[in-house]
Structure formats: structure tokens, C-alpha cells
Image (cartoon, coloured by chain):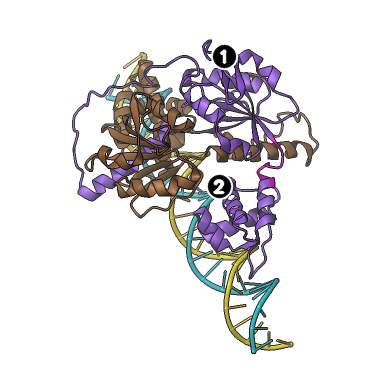
Chain colours: A brown, B purple, C yellow, D cyan
Amino acid sequence: MGTVDVPEATVARLPQYLRALSAFADAGARTVSSEALAEAAGVGSAKLRKDLSHLGSYGTRGVGYDVEQLRRQIADRLGQTTSWNVVIVGIGNLGHALAGYGGFASRGFRVVGLFDDGPQVVGEVVSGLPVRPLEELGEVLRPGEPTIGVLAVPAEHAQGVCDRLVAAGVTSVLNFAPTVLRVPAGVDVRKVDLASELQILAFHAQRKATRAVAPLPAPAAPAAAPLPVHPLDAVRPRVGEVV
Amino acid sequence: MGTVDVPEATVARLPQYLRALSAFADAGARTVSSEALAEAAGVGSAKLRKDLSHLGSYGTRGVGYDVEQLRRQIADRLGQTTSWNVVIVGIGNLGHALAGYGGFASRGFRVVGLFDDGPQVVGEVVSGLPVRPLEELGEVLRPGEPTIGVLAVPAEHAQGVCDRLVAAGVTSVLNFAPTVLRVPAGVDVRKVDLASELQILAFHAQRKATRAVAPLPAPAAPAAAPLPVHPLDAVRPRVGEVV
DNA sequence: AGGCTCTTGTGAACCCATGCACAAAGTCGT
DNA sequence: ACGACTTTGTGCATGGGTTCACAAGAGCCT
């Protein structure tokens, strides 16, 4: 079954599932149904089952999935059984925050180096690690060990720093700078753009606002016409909670 | 043409385009071809043209797009013509970083409030704003003005804080906590999960590694590995420390 | 004007992803 | 043992997104 070809969309959800599974494990559950797990992960149960089928994991019909076995299964697929080295370049506001982020260590990511070229930052100790100049990259990267590079530098320097990371052997990069990075084939780049996220929210908020005013002046339309508009609200809302 | 229905995938790319356009504008270009703009934004030119066609913007054939006009067009769609208020809840490492992030202000987002319930954080001044207790949320949120809430609190408190935000009238939330948020219909939530991004990179890196070494399964770690399993993030500092 | 060159906008094919619905496969109670 | 019940795994239909390829338009040069 799904030994090699796991769809990208599925991969993006695996961390979600893993987290939900850990929660169930903490709660002492030994098995969990696709319905319950999907609920906890905020997706549909059919989607969850199909996702799991992609990685060939077996539940037992009539019962559900073995929590511990499935947890280990997914963790293994996500590479959590091996320890990944992480280097963070750019120790500004964001770099500081990332260096101190507890969520990394708890998932098998070990921050092994902090780098910056600012004279006033180099030498400072952040979260137990000294900030080193970029030149010392090679001293930290071990060729054998897989290493992920995190870019938290200003946009102007992102490409240059990325090139140096790649030259040093890094093949996985997480980029926080708002820039498109050119990398040779074989190097993976993922991008996190904080401002973009806000802009997307603003787009939808604006649409909501103009929708409410302009088209149909139907204020407080009763539940007769269920207009669950866009797919972003796939998460089942808990109505009556607030407001 | 595309007055109302802009595909979600397109929306997610608009910030990219806007950024690229600004770069072209800075460089003094008056027009730009879809090929050049796509190159700068890191997408295919056909995709770019289709995206732009969705929002009905007109280029001129044989020439390209008017940089300034298109920039304004997209900025308008993304709501950048109006100023959005932003409140950040959870002033730990990440909250600090977000409060000081310059990329927000330059895109029309004004941070108007910082909140936390940790006694030792409240009162501190971060990036020119005092950290207030969560109770004072209502004093900052103006009902008329659109406000986006940013959650940078630990996972356990995310849902509770989110409920309070929604109760106070916030309808757009950016969530950095690794949790699924339940919100009533009409409220938009976007999630940024830093650890997930690393996990996805790790997945691909692992796949690359096993592909390169052995097309056949390589049982590196067969039996149960006694990993230090700290499910939902082992040690949790005070409220609002890290995410 | 006419033809040449360039570039947009879009029809159409394709691919990936989502959701439904149900048979297969297991458990539980009697 | 057997039937009722539960839950997985998946075939299929549907829809969204991406890519190709090209006709329609716009400028430019002679």
C-alpha cells in the first residue's frame, strides 16, 4: 500500500494526527475510532481514514486504531525516531523566539547552532547556546547528520544566507523571510510568512464585511437557508459557546 | 469577471504577488509581463495570469501589466487600503517577536494591544506598548473597527483565550498554538504551526535519504524505541511564555 | 495598411483532493 | 453459533486547482 507515495496534503496533516494521538494516549485511551480522532484533529473522518490508508497502517474494524501503535507509526513516518539537528540563522526578535521554542525539542528537533553576523549579537548566549558568526557554520554541521536550516534573517540577506547553508550541505530549509528562495534541485524549502497570514485574514474579513452590507439585505436570516460559505470553516463550529 | 469568487488558492498567493510588484515598482518598472512577475513570485506564468484574471484585473496584451495599477488593485483586494487593528495575546518569546515585527506595520496592520495573564509580564512595556491583563480586552477593542487577534499562548490556554476574543467581537484569529480551535461560524481562523513545518521537512528529508540509499525498505530501527515521549509539549512555562 | 512580434486571457485536459456511501471485517451478547 | 452492531477501508463521483496550448488583442516597424 502506501509505502512510497503519500500525497502532500496528507503529509501536511500527519503532525495534526500525531498531536491528537498523543493527547489520546495521555488520556489513557488504548484505541480510538476514526470518528473520535478526526474530531480531535479537526478534520472529517473519511479524510482521516483515507489519509491513514495511504501509509498502510491498519486499524481493526469494529474497534478502531490502536493508539500507541498508530502513534509510533506516524512518528516513524515523520522521522521523529531519529534526532534532527537544527541551525537557526538570524538571531533577532524571531530568532530568539525560535531558539527558545519548547515545541522543537519535544519532537526530536535539537537546536545545535545559532548564527548571526551582527557584531552586537555574536557572542551572546541565547537559550544556552552561544551566537556564532556565520563563518563557523561548517564547524557545526556534521556531514553525516541530517540538518535543517531555519532562516530568520531580513529579506535582503535571505538568499545569500540560504546559499551558504546549501553550500554547507543543508538540504532542508525553513524560511521566515518574505522572499522567494532559489535553491538547487534536491533542496526542500518551506516558507512561513507571518504578514501574509494576516493579509489573507484581512481579505476574508473584508469580504465578510462587504458581503454583509452589499448584496442581499437579509439581516438575521433564520437557519432556514444554511449558507455555510467557504471551506475554510471546515471545522465544525461550536455554536452557542460565546457571543 | 471575478468580482466575488476568488479561489482560496489564489488568495493565498496574492501577498506574494503584491510583494513582487512592490519590488518592481521600487526598481522603477512601469509595466511587467506575467512571465517576469511570475518568475519573481516563484510561480508559473500561466498560474499567475489565471489568478489575476480571477480578480478581473486587466493587463494589456503585447505589453504586460501596469505595475502601479496592479499593485493598487491587489492591495485593495487584500484590504490594505484600510488599517487593521491587531491584538497579540501571550507575550512570551514569540509574542515579543511578533510585537516587534516590522513587517506588520508596513502592510497596514497596527498592533494596538498586548495581553497576557502572567503577573510578571503584565505591566512590562514591549515595543512601546504596555502588556495588559486579559480583562482589559474590551477597553482596546472598538466595535466598529475590524480587529485581528493573534494567539501566541500555550496550547492549553488557546481555546479559552480564543473564546474570550470571539466574545469581545474578534472575527479573525491567527493561531500559533498547536491546537484545533473551535469557533462559531463566521469567525476565521488561520493556523501557523512551527513544529509542524519542521516535521514536514523531516518527512521529506527522510524520504530523500531512504530513496538515495535503498529503494528497498531499510529497517534502521526495528523494535520499540523508548523515546522520551512528551505528548503535548512536556514542560509548560507560565501563561504566555512560549507557544 | 499590412504583417510581425509580443503577451494576455481562457478553453480544455489533467491531476489531486474531498466527501459519500457501502461492502468487508471485526466485536459483543445471547 | 449466530445475528446485531460497530467501524474500517475503499470505489466512485464531484470539485478545485494546475498546466498546456492557442486564439484574440495590442503595439511596432516598414
- Left or right placement of residue B35 versus residue A24 in this view: right
Residue A37, percent across and down? 43, 27
Separation of residues labelled 1 and 2 (CA atoms) = 39 Å
Label 1, secondary structure: give it.
Answer: loop
Quadrant of the rendering where the N terminus of chain B is positioned: bottom right
Say yes or no: labels 1 and 2 on the same chain.
Answer: yes
Amino acid type assigned to the residue bearing label 2 in the image: Ala
Residue D10: image quadrant is top left
Chain at numbered mark 2: B
Whether label 1 touches label 2, CB < 8 Å:
no
Amino acid type assigned to the residue bearing label 1 in the image: Val
Residue B41, percent across and down? 52, 53
Residue range highlighted in magenta: B76-83
- Left or right placement of residue B131 versus residue A145 in this view: right
In this rendering, the count of numbered labels is 2
Residue B5 versus residue B34 in the image, above or below? above
User: Observer-nearest residue: A31 or B121?
Assistant: B121
Q: Residue at x 69, y 40 (%)?
A: A207
Which residue appears farthest toward the right when viewing the image? Answer: A217
Residue B82 painted magenta: yes
User: Observer-nearest residue: A69 or B104?
Assistant: B104
For label 1, the residue is: B122
Residue A56 painted magenta: no
Residue A120, percent across and down? 43, 32
Label number found at residue B9: 2
Which residue appears farthest toward the top when viewing the image? Answer: B119
Chain at numbered mark 1: B
Residue A239 in view, yes or no: no
Q: Within 10 angstroms of label 2, few (less than 14), some, or many (20 or more) residues?
A: few
- Left or right placement of residue B220 versus residue B47 in this view: left
**What secondary structure is the magenta-colored segment mainly?**
loop
